[in-house]
Image (cartoon, rainbow, N blue to C red):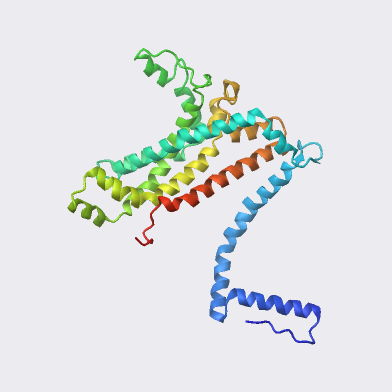
Amino acid sequence: MLCVVPPSATGVESCYLIMSSALLRFLGPTPLSRRKALWGIALVAPNTLGLFFFFGIPVLMAFSTSLQEWNAIKPATFIGLDNFTRLADDPTFWNALENTFKLLLMTVPAEIALALGVAILLNQPLAGRSFFRAAYFLPVVTSTVAASVVWTWIFQPRYGIINSTLSLFGVGEIKWLTEPSLALIPVAVVAIWQRVGFDMVLFLAGLQSIPGVLYEAALIDGASTWQRFRHVTLPMLSPTTFLVTVLAVVNAFQIFDQVYIMTLRTVPGGVGGSATTLTYFLYRRAFTNSEFGYASAVALVLFVIILAVTIIQLRTQRYWVYYESEEG
């Protein structure tokens, strides 16, 4: 549809006609298609506005704050990229980044493997299956703070259950939270314990959507249990595995509560920053040191890292994720 502007139209009228024409082209060529387009816009508008107000605006404000020196008391001072330059030379930041990636490697594979194993087990016709499903999901709805407090007692060097059990086998006292080389282990254990139930539910849904005829065909072909799992279950479950992996990676980058609570009574952030993650480093800079500009720079770097990792996951899914709608 072309916009025909009358020669006698004024500048304002011409602009109005051009915009009207562009809007009609966007909505569709017929009244029915325009009505459908308007309904579509109306339905997605709440989520779009929500994303803009609760995600877009904070990101823009964080970017603006990262270019300033601001302690929330004195007026902000524009300093350009100085916060990012300082970040690149800050060994504490690099230590926190290293710890974050260590936690990522410790939690994501274990979390996925445990969740998949539990889901496969609880997908079998076992007695009390509903109870065990609820029991495994319970940590998901448990407060992270409460869980961290309990697990801090469990990892307590002298009276904790873990050391008490290990002492039966002659293992000496282990200082889980104050030994730098071990400080990340309790944090990872709590993170895994709280996430397995959520991932298990996703895997259960994926397992129950696999057509039984595929297993019957594999049985007729003489496939063993491992071969059915390897060539039927895993490929059909790959979209769920992809979703679980993306969510687990994002969650691993955002681990904060466990570090804060479990190291609160000893050395905050672990001895020598051995348990400090990027989110904990961000918190300390913002709410302990009142360096909101510097903390915003950390938040933006974390945002960019998560975005980059997620994009890589999305781009590589074509090599290992199978969708039923695909041909072949």
Residue at horizontal 22%, vertical 52%?
218
Q: Nearer the viewer, residue 64 or 102?
A: 102
How many marks can you see? Answer: 0
In the rendered image, residue 91, in percent from the top left (x then y), is placed at 65, 28
Q: Position of residue 198 (x, y in %)?
A: 42, 43
Q: Quadrant of the N terminus?
A: bottom right
| Residue 115 in the image: above or below residue 55 | above
The percent coordinates of residue 118 (x first, y second) are: 34, 40
Residue found at x 33% / y 50%: 207
For residue 256, above or below residue 236:
above
For residue 205, side relative to residue 102 (left or right):
left
In the image, 319 versus 138, the foreground residue is 319
Q: Nearer the viewer, residue 196 or 104?
A: 104
Task: Identify which residue, 187 or 105, lies in the foreground.
Answer: 105
> Which residue lies at the image location 51% right of the left edge and 41% below the top edge?
251
Residue 283 x, y percent position in the rendering: 64, 34
Q: Is residue 279 left or right of residue 15?
A: left
The C terminus: image quadrant: bottom left
Q: Looking at the picture, does residue 16 appear above or below residue 179? A: below
Residue 195 vertical placement versus 39 (above, below): above
